[in-house]
Amino acid sequence: MQIYLPIAELSINVFLILGLGAGVGFLSGMFGVGGGFLMTPLLIFSGVPPAVAVGTEANQIVASSVSGVLAHWKRGNVDFKMGFMLLNGGVLGSVFGMFVFKYLRTLGQVDLLISLSYVLFLGVVGSLMLWESGQALWRKKQGVEPKRGRRHHDLAHRLPLKMRFRKSRLYISVIPVLGIGFLVGTLAAIMGVGGGFIMVPAMIYILGMATSVVIGTSLFQIIFVTASVTILHATNTQTVDIVLALLLLAGGVIGAQFGARAGLKLKGEQLRALLALIVLAVCVKLGYDLVATPDSFYTVSALVHL
Amino acid sequence: MRWLTLIPFLLMAFSPSTMAQEPLATDLSEDAVAITSDFNGKDLLLFGSTGDRRFGAESAEPLDVVIVVHGPEVPMKIWRKERVAGVWVNSQPVTFENVPGYYAVATNRALSDIAAEDYLRRENIGADNLVLVSVEDVSLDEKTELREAILGNRGEAGLYQLHEDAVSFPDGRLFRSSIHFPSNVPVGDYRVIVRLFQNGMELDRSYSVVTVGKQGLEQQIFSLAQDYSFFYGLGSVIIAMLAGWLASVAFRRN
């Protein structure tokens, strides 16, 4: 069954989109990640124009983060003060990211920007995760006690403009908080991701937040950063396809439920190693497409939407 | 009800041939293509009568029909890909001002057999004879190369078509053909020009217009996104938030 997407302006199989939503939803439920970093490339691989993939995926992440954050909120695992500070940086970052996106779009380089950003961030995050989880698995096999992780958040303590975050049990400078928010907001606007895969490690290793509030707080600020990205893309590039977003959402909600159950059967290190391999696979595919000799040596684009 | 459109032609076919020169007459099965949510391309039928002139009459030279469907013209940018540090990137773009978003030609036999090359070029018949004007100053060689690339790209997208065996004559005077609009067809007004040739000479031509447009929900969503983009964005966010909330409520009960 085909459906015509009004903004993407193409006819696509409904079951392909529902299946993509369910597949990525399954993985995001299993690993507790947003899945934007998988969904945006997969949409591009299915023929959706990259700009539409980014704008639409931001809209879908709003929904998945809302449904994710409610459970954490109920358990009191959201540090709202920290969330608002991250959000300040995040909204500024999304405006900056949108500016870069729009500028490169007029130069015809936005597809390259999206691909390069993905290769870079997925490559770095995937490699670090694989290294960390590989070590953990190896240690477990050898029966060695894991070393107590050193906390690298000295920077957050030394900088000025300190603020108390009671829930996170921190008294730190707001500068790194705003900076991390800004970076993630920029990436959200350019890559169509929530940025949880950067935000969560940054909260733990750079800010030193209590791990119990990390996921809930990250989800909380992702809602508003992706909402800002959705509105920015809707007004600047007109690339938010609500029909596509709703279809992805429907598949995603169901997939996430099964994924969460499947995730309970695997151990933490195994989950992280598996996720790292998926992240690296997407990175390699995008990287290969950048360097492989293309089918056509030309890019042709109608200027209707610019 | 499509057969109803055949009636005038049937009448014409049986009318006495003693009348004065009857002109070429054509009609389309529909004069609009509606892009709705289940749109997956569409075929329109084109019917025509050659008037008094008969196809395949013993006394006369054979008749030829050339149908050109010309979509709305848009500016188009083209970049040549270049390898920079191993990565393929777009180089400086060249803009062509007036590239038809859709261009289809249907004939009863090879275009080169129907009319002289000169004539086809002068009348801009066939994608190879389209005049594309570039905004930037580029050399003739480069322009030819980029032109070829645009034609190739549009052809692969199914938006430029050449069907040299697509007009059939079920009867001496009647002919028909179909025009295929693929699912990625751009919106706008399409000019349909039917030309009647004999012995390499154009005898007559007819014009009609087909409008391709989004309809119903597709049209509403699209115009909302274009004209009220802020409210469209805000609405998309609110819908997403509600959907996310509903999902968590629905699955908590389970």
Image (tube, rainbow, N blue to C red):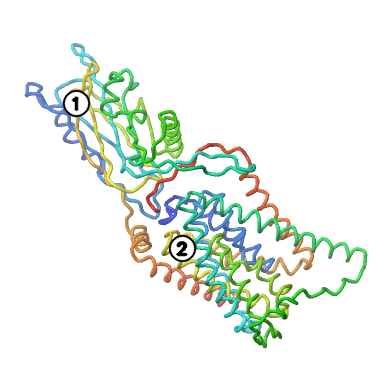
In which quadrant will I find the N terminus of chain B? top left
Q: Position of residue B204 (x, y in %)?
A: 18, 26
Amino acid beneath label 2: His
Which label number is shown at residue A233? 2
Q: Quadrant of residue B114?
A: top left
Amino acid beneath label 1: Thr
Q: Position of residue A131 (x, y in %)?
A: 79, 60
Q: Secondary structure at mark 2?
A: helix
Chain where mark 2 sits: A
Residue drawn at (58%, 54%) of the image: A41
Q: Is residue B197 above or below residue B73?
A: above
Which label number is shown at residue A238? none
Q: Is residue B93 above or below residue B193?
A: below
Q: Secondary structure at mark 1?
A: loop
**Which-is-in-front pick, marks 2 and 1?**
2
Q: Which residue is mark 1?
A: B50
Chain where mark 1 sits: B
Residue drawn at (50%, 58%) of the image: A101
Q: Position of residue B190 (x, y in %)?
A: 28, 42
Q: Are marks 2 and 1 in contact (CB under 8 Å)?
A: no
Q: Is residue A188 above or below residue B250?
A: above
